[in-house]
Image (cartoon, grey):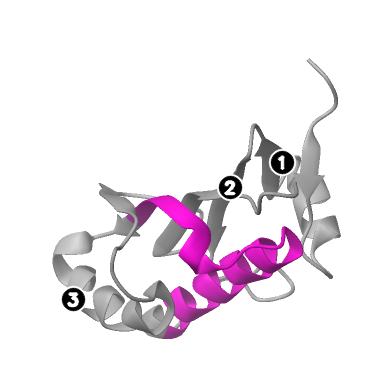
Amino acid sequence: MGKRDVIFPAGRRALYERNRYSPAVRANGLLFVSGQVGSREDGSPEPDLQEQVRLAFRNLNAILHEAGCTFDDVVDVTVFMVDPQSTFERVWQIVPEFWGETPYPALTAVGVTWLYGFDFEIKIIANLPPND
């Protein structure tokens, strides 16, 4: 296997290196993005749930932008939510701000008990532009 083709969003490389993972990897015409949370620049969680979701999408969009993609290139989404029974409706009120128009990407939503202090996480797979 060759060296991984890693994408780092501007200004957040130290956060990923400290935690020992890649934010996104290009492979075979696809972009695989690690789960993005609503972390502030220092890595701490945004306390307001809806702002945390917005920040997670902004963090995701920064990676997509760095790879030459937009959310329209996303084909598969997995979201993780702590206590989805009580948070799903508030989370899903924010999604249309970032999701775009139909056809929508494939989606899997998973309820979890722990996300390292966060309440929402999103990971995706996107098509890369043809020249990559």
Q: Does the image show residue 129?
A: yes
Earlier residue among tags 3 and 2:
2
| Residue 98 in picture, x, y percent from top left | 43, 78
Q: Residue at x 31, y 62 (%)?
A: 104
Q: Nearer the viewer, residue 24 or 36?
A: 24
Residue interval drawn in magenta: 51-80
Whether the residues at callouts 3 and 2 have beta carbons within 8 Å, the answer is no
Q: Amino acid at mark 1?
A: Tyr
Whether the residues at callouts 1 and 2 have beta carbons within 8 Å, the answer is yes
Q: Residue at x 75, y 46 (%)?
A: 132
Q: How far is disc 1 from disc 2 in space, using C-alphas?
A: 8 Å
Q: Which residue is mark 2?
A: 34
Q: Which residue is mark 1?
A: 21
| Residue 56 in picture, x, y percent from top left | 52, 70
Q: Amino acid at mark 3?
A: Glu
**89 shown above or below 69:** below
Q: Which quadrant of the structure image shows residue 101?
A: bottom left
Q: Nearer the viewer, residue 99 or 22?
A: 99
Q: Which residue is mark 3?
A: 89
Q: Does the image show residue 117?
A: no
Q: How far is disc 1 from disc 3 in space, using C-alphas?
A: 31 Å
Q: Secondary structure at mark 3?
A: helix
Q: Amino acid at mark 2?
A: Ser
